[in-house]
Amino acid sequence: MPGVLKVLFVCTGNICRSPTAEGVFRHLADRAGLGALVSADSAGTHSYHVGEPPDPRTVRAALARGVDLSALRARKVAAADFTRFDHILAMDRGHLAQLRRIAPAGATAALRLFLDDAPGHIGHEGEGQEVPDPYYGGPDGFEQVLDLCEAGSRGLLDRLSRESRFPIRESLG
C-alpha cells in the first residue's frame, strides 16, 4: 500500500482559488474511495489574508456543489512545504514562477500548474491553462473556478490511477 500522497494548492491570498481546489480535490478523492490515501492543503504566495476563512462567495459557490470550505483558513506558503508535500500545484504561471524562486535547496515537491492534468485545459505549449482569479468579478467567475478545479482534480486523480498509485473505486466523471 503506498503512503499518503500530499498535495498543496497555491494561489495569491489563499481565499478563492486554492481553497476551492483543496476542497474539490478532497471531495472527489473521498467519492473515489481515496480519502485515506491523500492529504490536501492550500496556501497563498502572499500573507494578505492569513488566518481568514475563504471569501464568502467562494464558500457559497462550493457549498452549492456539496463542497464545504467553511473550516479552511488562509496561510502563506512556508519553506517546509517544499519537502512536506509531494505535489505543489499553482493556479497560474505567476504563482508557479514565484514558487520556483522561493523553493529552498533540497526541495522535493513536484511544482506544476494545477491544470496540467486537466483534459481539454492544456495550452499551446503542453502546459496547463491558468485558473483565473474570480475575486474582482461576479458569481460566474466563482462557478468557472469550481469547474476548473473539478477538471484539474479529476485529471490529477486519473493520472495517479494510471500510474497505479491508487485504485480508483468510483468513476470521477
Image (cartoon, rainbow, N blue to C red):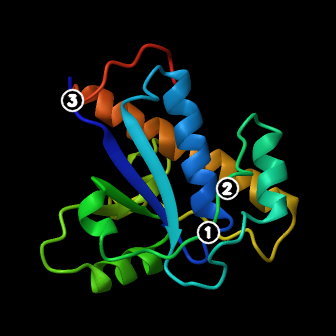
Helix or strand or loop: what does disc 2 sit on?
Answer: helix
Residue 172, position in %: x, y?
Answer: 52, 24
Question: Where residue 74 is drawn, which disc sits there?
Answer: 1
Judged by depth in the image, the label closer to the viewer, 2 or 3, is 3
Question: Where residue 6 is drawn, which disc sits there?
Answer: none
Tag 3 residue: 2
Q: Earlier in the sequence, mark 2 or mark 3?
A: 3
Where does the N terminus fall, quadrant-wise? top left
Q: Nearer the viewer, residue 123 or 69?
A: 69
- Asked which quadrant contains residue 88, the reply is bottom left
Q: Earlier in the sequence, mark 2 or mark 1?
A: 1
Residue 130, position in %: x, y?
Answer: 52, 65
Q: Residue at x 48, y 36 (%)?
A: 154
Residue 32, position in %: x, y?
Answer: 49, 21
Amino acid on which disc 2 is placed = Val
Label 2 crowd (10 A; few <14 / some 14-19 / many >=20): many
Q: Is residue 25 left or right of residue 90?
A: right
